[in-house]
Image (cartoon, rainbow, N blue to C red):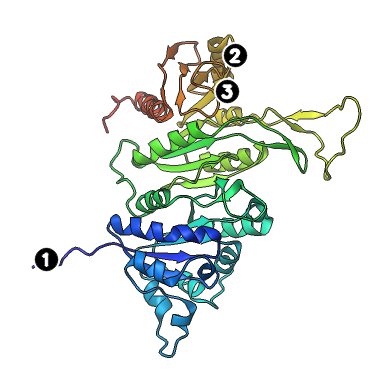
């Protein structure tokens, strides 16, 4: 007799943010996806959502500090920690800090010290708190333990005095999709199985003083599309992204950076054992030679700013390319193919994807792109306009063709 298949389990911890009001909707959607759900409501969460609403949505009694320290205490934090996946929604700065520093004085924190399944944090707080160095240090610590983050996003939220901005919690549908990605990642049966792919994405910010910087409107969507396509084809993916309003994709390691120097450090480190490197990031060509430590006051008349070149990351990668496939992007307004071919030759890239920001439908931030593949010798192939995901798939197809050519086999054969 075979054992009946058990339903997957999810533990949802609700933190102390006004975004906690979304948690019943998340619980309902998790149950619709087939999950048996348990809930821990922190004391702060109960200021925004009631135990009854959570219990009704979850179909289970809600666990709180009172149930943990009740008249008949049991190892409730240990039993709750057995869930297949753990999701912390409306995650506050306080809850992040408690988890990062191993506190165990409440049920949520004690449970997080005992979990063995994947952990997904869905933060919700105002932008100032999220950007504070202490909060970011805690986030990085949790990421180093393998925890995943979704958001925060830009949008309207309920903080007094701030109608919108960075800090909004992801929607229940996005959270469920992230959960499914964590516990049911694409099986490593694709044509990139066993390969490591490094992708850079988004802009860099080169600060002139603490509040002013040089940057560009890159959305990061192209790089994220390449990374997700590589992940879905079985690759081990590292995504290094500048400041963008996109959540970390599940199923890969995402590293967030700000400046070109930070991007250089992370990409060079990740690329050491990579098989394919795709540099889609829009890296600022220059940075301030002397960044002011204090905000500079406005003055009458012209102001001169001394800029110094940023390192050429693609060229550095090309100098030590080895057998890896190296791919760059170029954005031009004229003489694009000639300039892209020269760039590919000088930087030892296998090919460059050229696009024109002034071309209709392919400007910064769009979901489509229209590129021309340019090889070092000047040979080019103009691709039709398509979604950025489709562009990403074709880039990876070409990278595999080059790998097969170097190995002396036909693409698709092992």
| Residue at the spot 86% in from the left edge and 27% down from the top edge | 304
- Which numbered disc covers residue 231? none
- First in sequence: mark 1 vs mark 2: 1
Instruction: Compute the Cα span from label 2 to label 3.
Output: 20 Å
- Which numbered disc covers residue 347? 3
Q: Which residue is mark 2?
A: 333
- First in sequence: mark 2 vs mark 3: 2
Q: What percent of the width, then of the height, locates residue 348?
A: 54, 23
| Residue at the spot 26% in from the left edge and 30% down from the top edge | 413
- Residue placed furthest toward the bottom: 71
Q: Quadrant of residue 36?
A: bottom left
Label 2 residue SS: loop
Of the two numbered discs 3 and 1 in the rendering, the one whose residue sits closer to the viewer? 1
Mark 2 and mark 1 in contact (Cβ < 8 Å)?
A: no
Label 3 residue SS: loop
Crowding at dot 3, Cα within 10 Å, few <14 / some 14-19 / many 20+, comes out as many
Q: Which quadrant holds the C terminus?
A: top left
| Residue at the spot 52% in from the left edge and 57% down from the top edge | 19
- Which numbered disc covers residue 2? 1
Q: Could you say which is closer to the camera, residue 131 or residue 346?
A: 131
Q: What percent of the width, then of the height, locates residue 226?
A: 44, 33
Q: What percent of the width, then of the height, locates residue 124?
A: 55, 56
Of the two numbered discs 1 and 2 in the rendering, the one whose residue sits closer to the viewer? 2
Instruction: Compute the Cα span from label 1 to label 2.
Output: 65 Å
Q: Vertical placement of 276 versus 99: above or below?
A: above
Instruction: Compute the Cα span from label 3 to label 1.
Output: 59 Å
């Amino acid at each position: 007799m075979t054992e009946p298949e058990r339903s997957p389990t999810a533990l949802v911890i609700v933190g102390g943010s006004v975004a906690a009001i979304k948690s019943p909707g998340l619980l309902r959607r998790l149950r619709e996806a087939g999950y048996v759900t348990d809930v821990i409501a922190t004391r702060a969460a109960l200021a925004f959502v009631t135990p009854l609403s959570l219990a009704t949505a979850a179909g289970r009694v809600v666990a709180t500090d009172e149930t943990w320290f009740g008249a008949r205490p049991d190892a409730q934090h240990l039993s709750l920690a057995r869930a297949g996946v753990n999701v912390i929604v409306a995650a506050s700065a306080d809850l992040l800090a408690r988890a990062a520093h191993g506190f165990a004085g409440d049920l949520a924190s004690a449970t997080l010290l005992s979990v063995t399944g994947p952990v997904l944090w869905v933060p919700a707080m105002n932008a100032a708190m999220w950007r504070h160095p202490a909060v970011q240090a805690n986030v990085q610590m949790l990421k180093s333990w393998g925890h995943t983050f979704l958001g925060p996003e830009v949008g309207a939220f309920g903080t007094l005095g701030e109608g919108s901005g960075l800090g909004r919690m992801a929607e229940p549908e996005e959270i469920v999709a992230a959960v499914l990605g964590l516990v049911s990642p694409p099986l490593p049966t694709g044509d990139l199985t066993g390969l490591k792919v490094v992708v850079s994405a988004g802009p860099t910010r080169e600060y002139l003083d603490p509040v002013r910087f040089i940057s560009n409107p890159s959305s990061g969507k192209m790089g994220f599309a390449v990374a997700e396509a590589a992940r879905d084809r079985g690759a081990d993916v590292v995504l290094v992204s500048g400041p963008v309003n996109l959540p970390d994709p599940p199923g890969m390691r995402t590293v967030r950076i700000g400046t070109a120097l930070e991007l250089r450090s992370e990409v060079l480190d990740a690329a050491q054992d990579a098989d394919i490197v795709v540099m889609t990031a829009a890296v600022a060509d220059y940075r301030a030679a002397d960044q002011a430590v204090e905000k500079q006051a406005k003055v009458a008349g012209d102001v001169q700013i001394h800029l110094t070149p940023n390192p050429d990351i693609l060229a550095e990668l090309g100098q030590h390319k080895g057998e890896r496939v190296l791919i760059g992007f170029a954005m031009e307004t004229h003489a694009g193919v000639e300039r892209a071919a020269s760039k590919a030759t000088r930087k030892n890239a296998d090919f460059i994807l050229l696009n024109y920001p002034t071309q209709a439908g392919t400007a910064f931030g769009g979901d489509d792109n229209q590129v021309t593949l340019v090889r070092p010798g000047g040979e080019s192939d103009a691709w039709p306009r398509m979604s950025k995901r489709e562009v990403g798939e074709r880039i990876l197809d070409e990278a595999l063709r080059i790998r097969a050519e170097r190995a002396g086999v036909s693409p698709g054969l092992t």
